[in-house]
């Protein structure tokens, strides 16, 4: 059996490229996705009370504590690019760290350098030190009243309002509200990206909070209980944790989502990522060969920046995979100025997908606007990996 992948030649004319629909209506005044028992106060969608913490300012990137739920205060960094003003507002992004992390000023600066306003908050009752960065994830306990630390879901038998995920997600929502309050921020072009646990929180945020124009979870995803990654074991081994692992938040969300992972990640596996893409209204995948798991690595993925620019700045998009492999044909759209320079099938003979899975690779055939790959049954799982002429990756879901 052969699976065909149409790419419409060297590129798809801009007037026919399947851009994501531009969001024109967003719920701005409260919780969007509302599963039974999970309720966030509407005040989180209002500008939170804030106070400066100048001791941790990093030049033009300013440090704050902002109000969250239950009288807790969250540390965050906020930065705006030069020239941002009420007359000339810029797009914005919310940055969510992973486990053993905190708010990273250099992550904010990286987005400022690309023309985005950005906020990076702490979600674990901590705050950075003067030498903290994505390459040096050191931190200390917050000097302000704060929420619980990340307990890897061991607190999920407590009332929902006392659980770490609830407080962490509240911190993200409050930070988005704070960022929106700055003159110079175009709140209709605000996205979110997170690394590892931050990617997991990003997946939840796009459902609970409808204000995002795009989302890009790196490594982290939902539907982990069915996967063989370490994160899945946390869900399976802790009563009540499945509440936060359900893909309902993704199904409810309206933002385009780019899921980023490798096929050797220890914590989050590609089969979980695939289920998330299927659940989301506008889900896409990129698999980065050799991508290791870490704050710095996850914060520097080029495809995330290009995805954000595509939606917020209308620049040249990533190659778009349009259909699922098991349908017998995979359609892709290629931006007019871009070519597919490499197409391969990555497959395994193993029933289980985890960090120890051995992947083999076969070169696909590009001919007359098609990419052909073998889909023989002995290949227990496979996905198609595309690399374009810019060196950027796009991928099909895992089947």
Image (cartoon, helix red, strand yellow):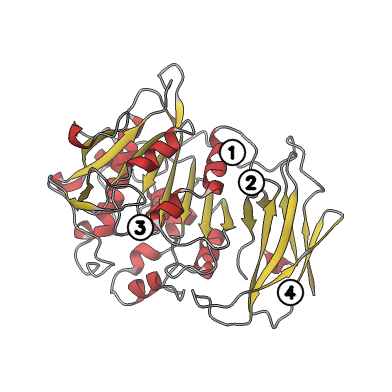
Q: CA distance from mark 1 to mark 4?
A: 32 Å
In the image, what residue occupies the spot 43% across and 69% down?
224
Q: Secondary structure at mark 1?
A: helix
Labels 3 and 1: the sequence-earlier one: 3
Q: CA distance from mark 4 to mark 2?
A: 25 Å
Please state the horizontal and vertical placement of residue 205, each as a whole percent of the image. Answer: 38, 50
Residue 318 badge = 2
Q: Which quarter of the rendering shows the N terminus? A: bottom right
Task: From this view, report whether residue 225 is shown above or below residue 85.
Answer: below
Q: CA distance from mark 2 to mark 1?
A: 8 Å
In this figure, which residue is indicated by the disc labeled 4?
375
Labels 2 and 1: the sequence-earlier one: 1
Comparing 345 with 314, the one in front is 345
Residue 35 badge = 3
- Select label 3 or label 1 by which is in front: 1
Q: Residues within 10 Å of mark 4 (few under 14, many from 20)?
A: many
Q: Secondary structure at mark 4?
A: loop
Q: Secondary structure at mark 3?
A: loop
């Amino acid at each position: 059996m052969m699976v065909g992948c149409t790419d419409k030649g060297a590129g798809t004319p801009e007037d026919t490229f399947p851009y994501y629909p531009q969001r024109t209506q967003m719920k701005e005044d409260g919780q969007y996705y509302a599963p039974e028992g999970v309720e966030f106060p509407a005040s989180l969608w209002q500008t939170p009370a804030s106070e400066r913490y100048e001791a941790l300012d990093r030049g033009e990137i300013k440090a704050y504590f902002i109000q969250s739920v239950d009288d807790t205060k969250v540390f965050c960094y906020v930065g705006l690019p030069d020239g941002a003003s009420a007359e000339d507002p810029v797009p914005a992004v919310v940055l969510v760290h992973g486990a053993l992390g905190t708010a990273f000023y250099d992550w904010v600066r990286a987005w400022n350098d690309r023309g985005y306003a950005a906020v990076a908050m702490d979600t674990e009752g901590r705050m950075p030190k003067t030498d903290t960065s994505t390459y040096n994830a050191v931190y200390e306990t917050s000097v302000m009243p704060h929420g619980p630390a990340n307990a890897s879901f061991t607190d999920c038998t407590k009332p929902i309002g006392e659980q770490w995920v609830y407080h962490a997600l509240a911190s993200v929502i409050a930070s988005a509200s704070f960022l929106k309050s700055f003159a110079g921020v175009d709140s209709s072009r605000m996205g979110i990206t997170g690394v590892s646990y931050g990617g997991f929180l990003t997946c939840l945020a796009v459902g609970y909070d409808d204000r995002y124009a795009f989302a890009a979870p790196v490594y982290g995803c939902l539907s982990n209980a069915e996967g063989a990654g370490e994160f899945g074991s946390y869900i399976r081994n802790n009563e009540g944790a499945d509440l936060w692992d359900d893909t309902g938040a993704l199904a409810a969300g309206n933002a385009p989502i780019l899921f980023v992972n490798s096929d050797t990640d220890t914590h989050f596996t590609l089969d979980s990522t695939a289920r998330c893409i299927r659940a989301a209204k506008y889900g896409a995948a990129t698999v980065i060969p050799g991508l290791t798991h870490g704050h710095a690595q996850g914060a520097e993925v080029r495809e995330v920046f290009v995805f954000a620019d595509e939606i917020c700045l209308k620049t040249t998009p990533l190659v778009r995979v349009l259909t699922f492999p098991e349908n017998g044909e995979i359609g892709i759209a290629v931006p007019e100025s871009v070519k597919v320079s490499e197409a391969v099938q990555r497959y395994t003979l193993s029933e289980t997908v985890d960090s120890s899975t051995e992947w083999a690779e076969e070169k696909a055939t590009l001919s007359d606007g098609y990419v052909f790959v073998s889909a023989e049954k002995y290949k227990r799982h496979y996905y198609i990996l595309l690399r374009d002429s810019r060196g950027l990756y796009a991928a099909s879901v895992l089947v």
